[in-house]
Image: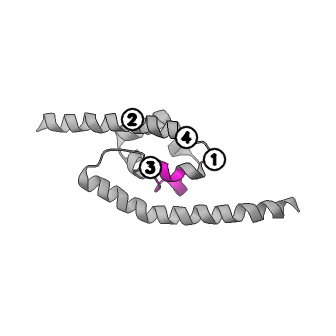
Amino acid sequence: MKFTTIARVAAPALLLATAVSAQADHHGEKAAEAATEVGAKFSTNLPIEALMADVSAAVVVEKHMPGISQHPAYGQFKAMSFRQVQPFSQGMVTDEMLAKLDADLALLSTEEAATDAAAE
């Protein structure tokens, strides 16, 4: 009897998460392409997989969220940004965490821009 109640409550949440993940897959690809094309700064608004594809950004992400790439559901949320994942994180991804991550990613973007300018 309890399992049926849990299943009725959990099923809509799983459907929503699946729908959001599917939508994020489509939009995540577009966002990653756009970010690459315009040389956008790294931020928590980029798809997680785009951040993890850059070695320097991945180090910063792992500093703030150790083991994120090994999370059992990584494949389901990697196309989403941390901002998109936050509402589904059950409080695990906080505004404070995202602010700190954004600050370090912005520094990384600034350092890369300075390195690129020095190379020219």
Residue 94 is marked as 4
Q: Which residue is drawn at 41% across and 59% down?
A: 28
Magenta residues, start to end: 72-85
Residue 48 is marked as 3
User: What residue type is disc 2 on?
Assistant: Ala
Q: Position of residue 19 (x, y in %)?
A: 56, 66
Asked if the residue under mark 4 is in contact with the one under mark 3, i.e. CB atoms within 8 Å, the reply is: no
| Lower sequence index among marks 1 and 2 | 1
Question: Rounded to the nearest whole Å, what is the CA distance between mark 2 and mark 3?
Answer: 16 Å
9 sits left or right of 75 in the view: right
| Lower sequence index among marks 4 and 2 | 4
* Location of residue 54 by image quarter: top left
Foreground mark, 3 or 4, reads 4
Please tell me which residue lies in front, 118 or 41.
41
- For the question of whether residue 55 can be seen, the reply is yes
Q: Which residue is drawn at 47% across and 61% down?
A: 24
Q: Position of residue 18 (x, y in %)?
A: 58, 64
Q: How crowded is mark 3: few (under 14 residues within 10 Å), some or many (20 or more)?
A: many
17 sits left or right of 57 in the view: right
Question: Rounded to the nearest whole Å, what is the CA distance between mark 1 and mark 2?
Answer: 23 Å
Residue, disc 1: 90
Query: Could you tell me which secondary element the residue under label 3 belongs to?
Result: helix
Foreground mark, 2 or 3, reads 2
| Lower sequence index among marks 1 and 3 | 3
Residue, disc 2: 103
Question: Rounded to the nearest whole Å, what is the CA distance between mark 4 and mark 1?
Answer: 9 Å
Relative vertical location of residue 33 with respect to residue 58 in this rendering, above or below: below
Is residue 82 in the magenta section?
Answer: yes
